[in-house]
Image (cartoon, rainbow, N blue to C red):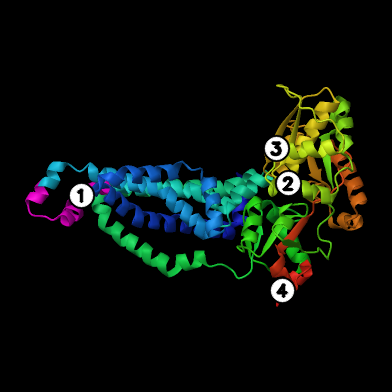
Amino acid sequence: MRELGHFFVANQSEILDQTITHLELTFISLLIAVLIGIPIGLLATRYERISGPVLGTVGVIQTIPSIALLGFMLPLLGIGPTPAITALFLYALLPIVRNTYSGINEVDGSVTEAARGMGLTNGQILRKVELPLAAPVIFAGIRTATVINVGVATLCALIGAGGLGEYIFRGIALNSGVMIMAGALPAALLAMGFDFILGLIERNMSSFLKPLLYGLSAVVILISAYAVPTILEEPPFRAGVGGEFLERADGFEGLRKRYEFDLPVVEMDASLMYKALKNGRIDVGVGYSTDGRIKAFNLRVLEDDKDYFPPYQAAPLVKQSFTQEYPEAVKAINKLAGKISTEKMTALNSRIDNNKESSQAVAKSFLDSLGIKTREIQCEDPDIKIGGKLQTEQFILAHIYQMLIENYSSHCVGLKTGLAGTKIVFSSLKNDEIQLYPEYTGTGLLVLLDPAQDTINRLSNKPDKVFEYIKEQFDQEFGLQWLKPIGFENTYALVMREEQAEKLGIETISDLAAYLRS
């Protein structure tokens, strides 16, 4: 708790900004849902033929997984607040529409008949009888929608909309419980606070009704005058960056200082960055040099002319005990040493990212091309588990190692791929949850070892020197061993759309920095 308290104090300004963004996303979407959902619910009560389709449609929307709904928004609305607000609005519709429909229908028919007998028109009956009697039920739907939106809004960080989810996803990528709690705790407190306040209003609806209407009017005016223009404002030139890269030792802050530039950043899921870049929603992306989408999307990799990024040779990482317990497996694994060039890895990635082939099929065809056995082995109780990060090539490499070990040793292999970040997969290895995963020397140097700057300068970004250094240090500090490098390097890279980079005359990161300063 003390560490969490220190984190809140040190990052109070950013946490406050993200909380405000979170509230804006929640209330703007909720306001739109109220303005549209209540009339839809009223129409459903007046025209019974449409009530089934209406309630069915909003019900189906609610069943779509949140992350999938956000993904559907990207091709239509891009990244940022607009798709986030749209998705949250759709999620808020069901409780509002359903409760409006139920609340009006539950009004006693004898009451409405008495009102009609007194000469009231249908509109007057709705305003003076049905809505006041149904108000508690309708408000309960708004209360439910509010709590739902506070929670779902955390996922909006994945598409660059900001909010408290940014801390949650950074924490997941870095295996930092403190960072996860920095996002989750304020979000949970907001949800509980709103639920309590709205529950209090709901229980005292008659006394709170007029102040509530005045309050809603003030909120509408405030949002119209400030929140909507602010949250929908987009900087003229911006970069899409994954949460892990923002916190890494070889990440964005160091890059910004090395090249002396200031570039607005949209934090977003790395897998969505390429689509956002291709569609012009961002101008610069932080990607991987072997990613197959770079060529397919006609992107330009900017030259790292100041050698900021270290060498990122790929190699298997295992515990020291693994080499003694599984010598046959080590021998099988080393059959891949030096066999995949950077160009070849890029081509293999492209087959998955662009041609939509399976990682297992790509791994098998590659090994077949080398004349290596790829017979499928059926086993139920794996004694070796191979892990991997959430990157295309890590899925390919995991399947390659599985086939090598099972065809050239007596061991059975299980896969635990798609782990969400370096620290998570590294911790899994140290805790014996996996026995092997592909890692990169640059990540090992700057993220896992984090040596002094004079050590980094002494290594001079030389691949052989970096590999020998981390091999020795991992043995001493962690009891881990790097096996023979696979052959390719996968460095971080700044990428831009080719036509935009050509138009602006940007070939290197220094060119980008000069353009940003101009």
Mark 4 or 1: the one toward you: 4
**Which residue corresponds to mark 1?**
130
Q: Amino acid at mark 2?
A: Arg
**Which residue corresponds to mark 3?**
417
Query: In which quadrant of the rendered image does the N terminus lie?
Result: top right
Q: In whole angstroms, how far apart are the C-alphas of marks 3 and 2?
A: 18 Å
Give the residue at x 85% y 53%.
311
Disc 3: CA contacts within 10 A as few (<14), some (14-19) or many (>=20): many
Image check: 436 left or right of 188? right
Query: First in sequence: mark 3 or mark 1?
Result: 1
Give the residue at x 21% y 47%.
133
Disc 1: CA contacts within 10 A as few (<14), some (14-19) or many (>=20): many
Disc 4: CA contacts within 10 A as few (<14), some (14-19) or many (>=20): few
Magenta-drawn segment? 114-137
Query: First in sequence: mark 4 or mark 2?
Result: 2
Q: In whole angstroms, how far apart are the C-alphas of marks 2 and 1?
A: 60 Å
